[in-house]
Amino acid sequence: MANESITKTFGVATGLCVVCAIIVAVASVSLKGVQERNKALDKNVNILRAAGLVKPGEKVSSAKVDELFADSKRVVVDLASGKIDETADPDAVEADKNNVVTLAKEDDVASIKTIPQKTVVYLFNDKNGALKTAVLPIVGSGLWSIMRGYLALNSDLTSVAHIVFYDHGETPGLGGEISNPLWTAKWEGKKALDDEGKPIIKVVKGTAAPESSDVDGISGATLTGNGVTNTVTFWLGDKGFGPFLKEFKAETLQNDELGKERR
Ligand SMILES: Cc1cc2nc3c(=O)[nH]c(=O)nc-3n(C[C@H](O)[C@H](O)[C@H](O)COP(=O)(O)O)c2cc1C
């Protein structure tokens, strides 16, 4: 067949497409396991960053990640009641597509439309088994995108240990600065809830007053900052982790008292 013939041209093009499609399909199927392991590792590293056990930018092996999770416990929280569901399997809860509640418009402070009915919280303990940090998953709308992160509270369940945003589509250099460790460091130690358990922490325009529950705004990115405030307000509030934090605070206080009595 002549090289210039249309049949040969189409035949070669089709053959090349089939070969390439097979290579891509084989690569995709054979690398799926690796991709899923990397995704799980990335998620766990972000949780550890929120818990303050991995520094920003620090590279950690999966063996080290497992080691750092040793003093932690995953618990399934029913958001409406605030109670820990001891019988629920965290992996099954995260995979359950029916684990969704639609928010009423007036409750949807973070503009996310739906939340899970049950969600997984990570509790990290110190060497004596006492609570050190509680890592809460958070999600909310920024200016352009859905922002996903973790908010870690100290053992008082009131002040911020760390905040991490690991997934968002805000503009690099503007709203994208929410994942800059220099900015997230400004959250550390801030009181997030008042004495009644109401969320009070917020991102302000400009510089925050020292000793306040305000966090410096990102210049040129007030709208993303407002999204972060809304996100944190929602998740620390009554429709988010508010009921859990109240229940759990009472429980940890009681355990502390029991511990003191026994000593
Ligand atoms: C191309 C482009 C991208 C922008 N990206 C963001 C962003 O990611 N987050 C944000 O809050 N503002 C962003 N802005 C700016 C907002 O429109 C708005 O001006 C800003 O949030 C106001 O903040 P300021 O009061 O601190 O200047 C962007 C503007 C432009 C033109």
Image: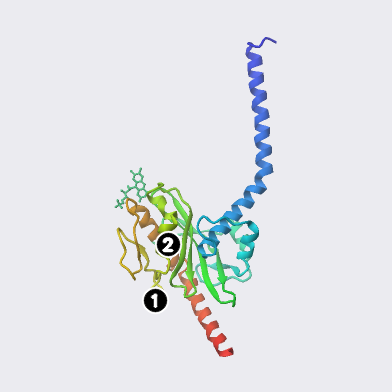
- Residues packed near mark 2 inside 10 Å, few (<14), some (14 to 19) or many (20 plus): some
Image location of residue 38, percent across then percent down:
61, 51
Instruction: Residue 39: tell me if it is visible.
Output: yes
Ligand 1 has an atom within 8 Å of the beta carbon of the residue at disc 1 = no
Task: Tell me what residue is drawn at x 47 percent, y 69 percent.
Answer: 153
Could you tell which of marks 2 and 1 lies nearer the N-terminus?
A: 2
For disc 2, does the CB lie below 8 Å from ligand 1?
Answer: no
**Label 2 sits on residue:** 185
Q: Position of residue 46 (x, y in %)?
A: 53, 58
Alpha-carbon span between mark 2 and mark 1:
26 Å
Pick the quarter of the image with the C terminus: bottom right
Front in this rendered view, residue 246 or 134: 134
The answer to which quarter of the image holds residue 209 is: bottom left
Q: Under tag 1, what secondary structure?
A: loop
For the residues bearing labels 2 and 1, Cβ distance under 8 angstroms: no
Q: Residue furthest top?
A: 2
Q: Amino acid at mark 1?
A: Glu
Numbered circle sitting on residue 196 = 1
- Looking at the rendering, in which quadrant would you find the N terminus? top right
Q: Is residue 109 visible?
A: no
**Foreground residue, 108 or 197?**
197
Q: Which amino acid, by three-letter code, is at mark 2? A: Ala
* Eye-nearest disc, 2 or 1: 2
Spot occupied by residue 61 in the image (x, y as percentages of width and height): 62, 56
Residue 263 — which label?
A: none
Left or right of 218 on screen, residue 3: right
Relative to 66, residue 2 above or below: above
Which residue sits at x=65%, y=30%?
20
